[in-house]
Image (spheres, rainbow, N blue to C red):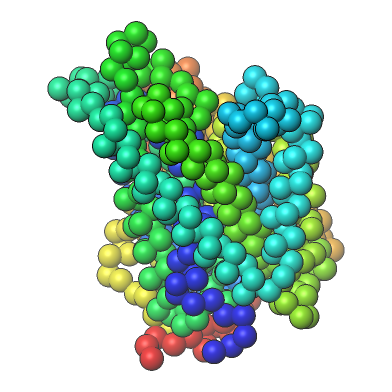
Amino acid sequence: MKKNQISLFSGVMLALSSLIGSGWLFGAGSAAQVTGPSSIISWIIGAAIMMLIAFNYVELGTMFPESGGMSRFAEYSHGQLLGFLSAWANWVSLITLIPIEAVACVQYMSSWPWSWANWTRGFFHNGTITNEGLWAVYLFMFVFSLINFGSVKLLTRFTSLIAVFKLLIPSLTIIFLILAGFHPSNFGSSAATFMPYGTKGIFQAVTVSGIILSYDAFQTVINLAGEIEKPHKNIFRGVWISLSVTAIIYVLLEVAFIGAVEPSMLAKAGWHGVDFASPFADIAILLGLTWLSVLLYMDAFISPFGTGVTFVATSARTLMAMTKSGNVPAFLGRVNKKYKTPRYAMVWDLVLAMALVFFFRNWSELATVVSVSTFVAYATGPVAAISLRKLRPNFNRPFKSVHLKWVAPVSFVLTGLVIYWAMWPTTIEVIFVVLLGLPIYFYYQFKKKTKNFVQQFKSSIWLLTYLAFISVISYMGSNAFGGNNTFKYPWDFVIVIIASILFYIWGVKSSYDGEDLKDAEKVNKDVKVDD
């Protein structure tokens, strides 16, 4: 075994440490507030979407087991412009996750109920991190990065320890909330009471309540593929085990939360009126489970902390992978000789993450940026997977399924819907942030005197046009999703679905056999299909 390689167990623990972060502490209460008992369906939909998207990336990740690989797949099939757009969007989402978790730590610290913790009260005010709290956020982010400065072995030991705790506390929460105060009547006695805000609320909750954010970290396994033992087998296993365990935990947490809400509270203002600052901890106190509330306040610090540490690792490797194409400064790809970690990339990510949280000090705002930018990147995955089957059918594919033929277009359609569900004007704001990377790309292309830029543009115009389409339909869509109601629900969904299918076909046809495929061949050459 090579030094610094990650075992399957460590890989799963690393993924779980990312997946079970601040989302479980905020998500259940937020989703129930948006759509009531039917929020259970929202969590199931979110899990199904992520599993279908992951299906594409498992094939790509096992074909190209390299660190930060998700930044390279679209480049192999469509050239450097599409690769850059995908990598930039994914990187934006990853560096945003670092301050999200730090903000979550500080927000929960500010609500600690103990007298000795009075000094934390000023960290958070009116839903926003204060200037005083900002320094605490910066300190957490610095520690996240410092842990990653050491070896991969240190990282995996830390996250494995954290992951065990992060699995234990949600499990105890589920069991004891159900035992202490479970009200079956809260789930309703008909479709109307189970879905008090209609089917629209179910889809809204998937994006705006942090559900998609909570499942997003499956890519941790993909981005660390170059450091995983037996990647041809363990990438698939790591992704599916971690996503399956997480989905079960999140669904059960939602069931426990809905059942634990006092019916008298619902009688006053309905599910929209259920607004807890610390959902599970507040309910535990109301049920007299003081010991559980103490554990929950502790976990509200530990869960985001573990996730923040993991995303420093993932974002740094994503930026490091982007340097291979020569479209960002080369020094960011340098690896420490002793520990084999990309320290320059970590420092750069930390600086930008600090700038982000200076301007966006609200957990929900940051979570929305993550959700949309991530799915802009995910739109390229299904297209790249199918395109590479067409361009290089002879590549070694340790994971190759006949189901990809239908999973790829379906998952592409779902990415478009998720971006749409983020609601206007969030859609256009985040798409604008993604496109801000283009001047950097153009600068390096001009510097390199690229000769095939026209071909790169032709192979990328489908995604640029698709983003423009999503922006327009978001503005003109139903008012349930922030639009001006030109296209009423559910016809707005129908338009997005049909258009997405057409864009998917266009995207696959836009692939081409270029120089970047030679790099892909080098990576794929030594891949094992079986032991």
Residue 182 position, x and y percent, is 25, 30
Instruction: Describe residue 219's horizontal placement relative to residue 444 as left or right.
Output: left
Instruction: Describe residue 292's horizontal placement relative to residue 79 as left or right.
Output: left
In which quadrant will I find the N terminus?
A: bottom right
Quadrant in the rendering for residue 441: bottom right
- Residue 94 visible in image: no
The residue positioned 79% from the left and 56% from the top of the image is 348
Please, is residue 361 above or below residue 372 in the view? above
The residue positioned 52% from the left and 65% from the top of the image is 160
Q: Nearer the viewer, residue 288 or 328?
A: 288
Q: Nearer the viewer, residue 281 or 432?
A: 281
Quadrant in the rendering for residue 85: bottom right
Residue 388 position, x and y percent, is 46, 71
- Residue 342 visible in image: yes
Residue 260 position, x and y percent, is 31, 28
The residue positioned 39% from the left and 28% from the top of the image is 288
The residue positioned 36% from the left and 27% from the top of the image is 287
Which residue, as the protein is rendered here, is positioned at the far left?
Answer: 189
Q: Nearer the viewer, residue 290 or 504?
A: 290
In which quadrant will I find the C terminus?
A: bottom left
Please, is residue 1 above or below residue 470 in the view? below
Residue 41 position, x and y percent, is 29, 37
